[in-house]
Image (tube, rainbow, N blue to C red):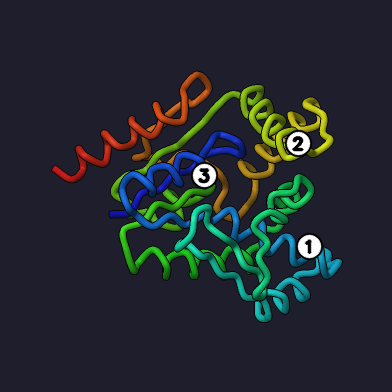
């Protein structure tokens, strides 16, 4: 079984996907982490995202690995554990731009499909149900208000000790939403057969339980 969870930044996709994977025993693949890792590589090498030739060279020489055998899942970039580094705010913003590049999406989508073909899995991202796994048995489009998403991100960063401003985060989310929905390649949109869930006033457990009911129904 393949489960696709799409939606805008901060809607809770990764949190829900991880919880579902734990409850169901299915493999969880954080596609966003893959784009973040590549964004980190471009940042570290001071590579302009406008330099497509340089980006293609990075793609050819970069190794991204995901270790699902431990909790929380670990992300490795060229052998280095970057699980925390890719969550930094400036890398999140850069990942949105990097993920819009055609060679980047082609390379990582190929890898995502390869991993998904080997087992029951849950993938979350922006274009899983519409492009990466259009034949997924269950497709979820998870949304939440901009204010709620900004609040969640603000609180998450504050807990980590980061100095941040709520309004700055909110504006970044608005910009990222626009970029994700208006990019030429695989824009963020709800698949025709996806079920929309608004998590604004729902707990993580409530959202997970709703999707679990859909899984049980699909298995009948």
| Disc with the residue nearer the chain's start (3 vs 2) | 3
Q: Counting other residues with Cα less than 10 Å from the Cα at mark 3, is it few (<14), some (14-19), or many (20 or more)? A: many
- Report how far apart the C-alphas of labels 1 and 2 lie in the structure: 18 Å
* Marks 3, 2: nearer the viewer: 3
Question: Is 88 placed left or right of 188 in the picture?
Answer: right
Q: Which residue is mark 1?
A: 49
From the top left corner, tell me how far across and down residue 97 is, in percent.
Answer: 72, 53
Q: Residue at x 45, y 37 (%)?
A: 141
Q: Which residue is mark 2?
A: 172
Observer-nearest of 99 and 87: 87
In the displayed structure, would residue 1 be above or below residue 81? above
On the rendered image, what quadrant is the C terminus found in?
top left
Q: Which residue is mark 3?
A: 14
Q: Residue at x 38, y 47 (%)?
A: 22
From the top left corner, tell me how far across and down residue 95 is, in percent.
Answer: 70, 53
Query: Are dots 1 and 2 in contact, CB under 8 Å?
Result: no
* Marks 1, 3: nearer the viewer: 3
Image quarter for residue 104?
Answer: bottom right
- Report how far apart the C-alphas of labels 1 and 3 lie in the structure: 25 Å
Query: Are dots 1 and 3 in contact, CB under 8 Å?
Result: no
Q: Look at the numbered disc 3 and give the secondary structure of its residue.
A: helix
| Disc with the residue nearer the chain's start (1 vs 3) | 3
Q: Look at the numbered disc 2 and give the secondary structure of its residue.
A: helix
Q: Counting other residues with Cα less than 10 Å from the Cα at mark 2, is it few (<14), some (14-19), or many (20 or more)? A: some
Observer-nearest of 34 and 97: 34
């Amino acid at each position: 079984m393949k489960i696709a969870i799409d939606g805008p930044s901060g809607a809770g996709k990764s949190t829900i996907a991880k919880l579902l994977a734990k409850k169901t025993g299915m493999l969880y693949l954080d596609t966003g982490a893959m784009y973040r890792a590549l964004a980190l590589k471009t940042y570290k090498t001071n590579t302009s995202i406008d330099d497509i030739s340089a980006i293609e060279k990075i793609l050819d020489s970069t190794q991204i690995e995901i270790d699902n055998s431990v909790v929380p899942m670990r992300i490795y970039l060229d052998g280095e554990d970057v699980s925390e580094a890719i969550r930094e705010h400036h890398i999140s913003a850069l990942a949105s731009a990097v993920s819009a590049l055609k060679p980047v999406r082609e390379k990582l989508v190929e890898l995502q499909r390869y991993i998904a073909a080997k087992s029951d899995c849950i993938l979350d991202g922006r274009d899983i149900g519409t492009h990466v796994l259009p034949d997924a048995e269950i497709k979820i489009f998870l949304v939440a208000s901009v204010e709620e998403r900004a609040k969640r991100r603000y609180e998450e960063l504050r807990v980590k000790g980061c100095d941040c401003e709520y309004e700055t985060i909110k504006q970044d989310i608005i910009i990222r939403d626009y970029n994700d929905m208006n990019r030429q390649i695989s824009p963020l949109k709800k698949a025709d057969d996806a079920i929309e869930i608004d998590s604004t006033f729902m707990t993580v457990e409530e959202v997970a339980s709703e999707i679990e009911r859909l899984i049980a129904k699909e298995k009948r």
